[in-house]
Each structure stands twice: as structure tokens, then as C-alpha cells.
Amino acid sequence: MEKYRLTTSQALVKFLNQQYVYIDGEEKPFVEGVFNIFGHGNVLGIGQALEQDAGHLEVIQGKNEQGMAHTAIAYSKQMNRQKVYAVTTSSGPGSANLVTAAATALANQLPVLLLPSDTYATRQADPVLQQIEQEYSTSVTTNDALQPVSRYWDRVTRPEQLMSALIRAFEVMTDPEKAGPATICISQDVLGEAFDFEAEFFQKRVHYMDPKLPTQRALHEAASLIKTSKKPLIVAGGGVKYADAREALMQFSESLNIPITETQAGKSAVEHTFKNNLGGLGITGTQAANKAAAEADLIIGIGTRYTDFATSSKTLFNFNNAKFLNINLSRMQAYKLDGYQVVADAKETLEQLHPLLEGYGSEHGKNIQALNDEWMKERERLGKIEFSREDFDPEIKGHFSQETMNEYADTLGTEFPQTNALLTINDTIDKDSIIVCSAGSLPGDLQRLWYTEQPNRYHVEYGYSCMGYEISGTLGAKLAEPDKEVYAIVGDGSFLMLHSELITSIQHQRKINILLFNNSGYGCINNLQMDHGGGSYHCEFRTAGQNVLNVDYAKVAEGYGAKTYLATNEEELKAAIAEAKKQDTSTLIEMKVLPKTMTDGYEGSWWNVGVAEVSEQESIQEVYAEKEKMLAYAKKY
């Protein structure tokens, strides 16, 4: 039997080059490349192997372990989970920096291969540099922190263990039901240790992502539920995108006259121009979608996890009247809200279910169009807010006094409302552009206001809503679609969390565009505390002397080598976007925007958060009483 004498790292790289997936009749490489930050734990092992022969793998140098892992995750998301990057880090703090990213991938069910180095298998030199020690066990390392945030986790302490570890990791990553982060921790001495690997291990492997078919029993019961409903409602989640179910869903919705609402992950699975699309649902949902949800007697959840934002903490639907039909690859997700379960691929289910409903039509009538028309008027209003220094009342967010609003306007040198800026961007960038966002008030504004005219142009990570994902994620989306303009839509708070992969984009000549909304604070959380009876406490960016901070973020990015612009009104923003399109390098447009000018919640947008049960403030007491009232109505499971 032929064998190859290779180090563990060389065998790893050779194996990665031989993994393929079968998509649309073609066999395509599954691993696109490797992100790296080399340290003493991996540079002499995986670093040496990549330098010797990387094969087809693109090797990209990251700047922060969390950042480069988020880039890899975003690449997987934009590629509909059909390709991945691997991520290699040194041991200790380099590995620890992966924990947040792994959790992001797990929450969003996105495959990524994480390769953190581990301590010495021989323990000869213990404790080595950056090794933690625990009294109760010598075997515990930093990488144990990755176990609860990995779909698959393994530790390799012998070269031959690599074979079973990798085969299992790829089984998990290429399974549409279990897809998530696969973490293989390899002891740093083992990375350079040689072994006679069997040649068979390096043969080309093709992984098949065959759709899971629904049973006839499930289909007929689902058809019966729909036929007996009068006003069914579709909740489209990320599973619609990953199943490539756009056309099947549109045909299903149109012929049966069933409106579609969207989760953050499901938004742009069907473009907004489709007549039955009512937009985002729940806490950050549109007025149209939430009204339809309140009237629905059957909720058809397709590829959704029913998070609290989509269900308004389980208060959005009429649980005394509505039933649930859940189409999902995951049995766990399909059982949510005590719904009837169709555990199968979304596209296959819709295509097979549709013929069983011949002659059925909902009783929505022309109400779908009426709801959309009503929302369109509200959307137009939100794009034309005007600031007044005497009596500013945008009917969006209150709380700040006129004096405070004027202070922000003077310090930031702007009177630009956030909603105006966002809708200006939506109207100005190319229709095939990709936007990336994750945290703060902007995901809410985007789910309500952003209109996509082409599918899969909306990339918002809201499964974990991880601050700092935006710029790394934008680079990942650019790697997935290099011919498209890709924009990070990010607040100043999230920009400060993590923006180091902007440098990676410049270094590796992958142009990204950053649209930075600067309102000098954590505006979303400031709204949360003040909406729930509190004051403005440590969420504004102010100096020790209580002056509003005015950071020049454009100058920061200019120092990195980006082309930068400043916009304080609609005309300047349009001009900046036009100029940014002409650039070959990454760009940043800093928009000075007024706080409290984001969208507020509409009907059915209650959120269950931890309000203080005991307080001397009457305002907090009132909010707590309202919470108890809502919980009495809310579904408990």
C-alpha cells in the first residue's frame, strides 16, 4: 500500500486540496483558502506546509483572529454554505480570539474550519509560552473554551488522529442540517511530527449536499393545514436562501395568494419587488408584516429559528387562533412553537406541496397590496425627516432634550437624520451591490427600510448580532463575489469594536466600501435604556468633561491607506458614493448623523428584556408592569 511520509501539517494541507462538493452537476473545491496569523504555535507547522505547497489554496494574512474568522464566516454565508475558508491561529490568546467568531458561525449555522494550535502533546516543556494551567487537570487548554461554540470539536495529539478528525469535520460542514464551525485543535509539536499516511487518505473526495425529501405523510398533513386556513402567512428564514428556494417560494405564494414576511436571514431570498413580499417581521419588522402576522391563522415557517426578534418575544401572533407549520431541515427547529413538522429541504417541500393545494386560495384578497401601499407611504416619510433647532420631533425617537440634540448637531456639524442617510444609500448604490451589517440600530432600519431588487444582496448577520462583524464580513462577501461593489453599513460603536480587516482588504487588493454612521455613541442601547424608563447612562460617547466626542474616523481610515470621504447631508453622500465607485482601493464614507433619528418599533414590536422589578423610578415601575402584562399573553414555549 502506497504511503506518503509527511508532517501532520503537510498532510492537513494536502487533504484540504482534495475536498470537493457536488453542486449543480459540477464538482467544485470546497476549501477556497486559508486565513492565517502565524505565531510560535503554528508558523513552523502549518506555516511551513503552506509555504512548501499550498496547492490551489489562497493564503490570506489576517490582522485579528476574530476578524479573519468572521471574514471566513461571511464568505461561507455569501456562498450559500457551498465553499469555506480554513482559519489557522497560534495557541493561547490567538486561539481564544476565535471563540466569538465560532459562536457567530454556530448561531448562524455557517460552516468554517477552525485550526487553533494547542499545547505540547508530550508536555515536555510545560508550561510553554501562552499556556494556561489549571489545578484540576493538566489536559485543559485555552481551546476547551471552543467546545460549546463548535458544531464539531476535536483535539489531535498524534499525527494519525488527523485522518479521522478531518473526515468527521467535513462530514459536519457539508451537512445542510448540521452545518457549523468545525474546530480541530492540533498540538504544536504534533504539527511538525511526521507519519506515514496512506495514499488513500489524499484521494479526491466529493461531498454531496443532497436535499432531504419530505415524506408523503408530512406533505398531506401540511396541505390539510393550509386548506383549512383562511389567512396563512409565510415566514421566510435563511433556509430559503440556502435551499435555493426563491422561485419555488414565489410561485407558491403567488398562486395561493399567501403573503411572505422575512427574518433578517431570509431577507432578499425574495426581492422586495415581488408583490406578496411584506418585508421584515417582528421587533424590527414593517408595519405591513406585523399587521398581517396579527391576523394570521396559520404561520408557515420556512427555514427559520423563530428568534425573539422575529416573533416579538412570542407575542406577535394570535396564539389562541393561529397554528404553526414548520418546514425545516432541523428537527429541533421544526418543533418550535409546537408546530407541525415537515423535516425536509425547503425547495423540495414547496415544489411537492404546491400541487396538493390545487384550487386553494387564501382570503387575503387585495389586503396584501393595501398593506404594502400603506407601508410605502411611511417609508417615504422616514426618508424626509427634517431637523429643527427649535422643536425637533421626528416621530422616530424622543428622549433627548432639544438642547442635547442641538449640542450633537453643533459638535458633529450635521443635521442629517439616520433614516434619510440610509434611504439615500439605498437609492444611490448599484442594484447588484451587496450590503453587510450586524449590530446596533442599523439592522432594524435595514430590515424595515432596505429594498433589494436582486436576490441575495442583503447580508446581515443577526443570528448572533456580533459587533465588529461588519467590516470583516464585507471582506468575506467581496471574496465570494469579487466583481460586485460590497458595502459595510456600520455604526461608530461597532467600527471601534473591530475594523482591522480593512487593512487586509487594502493589502490583498480586495476593494470594500465602509459606510460609517457616526452619532457618537451606542445609540441602539441608549434607546433601550431610555425606552425602559432609565436615563442616558454611559451609552453616549462623551469626555470626562461631558462633551460629545467628535472622532475623525475618515482620518483613521486614511492612515490605513483607504480613500475617504465625509458626508453631512444628502448631496455630499451621493457625491461620495459616486466617487467611491471609481476607486480601485477600499473606501470609507463617514456620515455624521444625529442620534435618535433611527426608526422605532411598529405595531407588534414588543421585546422582552430584563427590566428591573424593583426601582425608585416611577418610569421603570410602569415599564415593568407593562412587561408583566405582555408576558401574561406571550407563549411560554
Image (cartoon, helix red, strand yellow):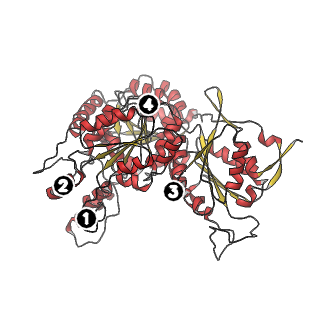
Distance, label 1 to label 2, CA atoms, is 18 Å
Of the numbered discs 1 and 2, the one sitting upstream in the chain is 2
Give the side of residue 289 with respect to residue 143, left or right.
Answer: left
Q: Quadrant of residue 452?
A: top left
The percent position of residue 412, horizontal first and vertical second, equals 24, 52
Q: Which numbered disc, 2 or 4, marks the residue closer to the eye? A: 2
In the image, 82 versus 518, the foreground residue is 518
Q: Which numbered disc, 1 or 2, marks the residue closer to the eye? A: 2
User: What residue would you read off at disc 3?
Assistant: 100
Task: Assess disc 2: are there few (<14), some (14-19) or many (≥20) residues with their C-alpha within 10 Å of its C-alpha.
Answer: some
Q: Residue furthest bottom?
A: 135
User: What residue would you read off at disc 2?
Assistant: 405
| Total numbered labels placed on residues in the image | 4
Task: Assess disc 4: are there few (<14), some (14-19) or many (≥20) residues with their C-alpha within 10 Å of its C-alpha.
Answer: some
The percent position of residue 623, horizontal first and vertical second, equals 25, 62
Of the numbered discs 2 and 4, the one sitting upstream in the chain is 2
Of the numbered discs 3 and 1, the one sitting upstream in the chain is 3
- Secondary structure, mark 2, is helix
Amino acid type indicated by mark 4: Pro
Which quadrant: the N terminus?
top right
The percent position of residue 41, horizontal first and vertical second, equals 67, 59
Q: Which numbered disc, 3 or 4, marks the residue closer to the eye? A: 3
User: What residue would you read off at disc 4?
Assistant: 455
User: What residue would you read off at disc 1?
Assistant: 534
Q: Quadrant of residue 297?
A: top left
Distance, label 1 to label 4, CA atoms, is 41 Å
User: Is residue 335 in sight in this rendering?
Assistant: no
Distance, label 3 to label 4, CA atoms, is 29 Å
Of the numbered discs 2 and 3, the one sitting upstream in the chain is 3
- Secondary structure, mark 4, is loop
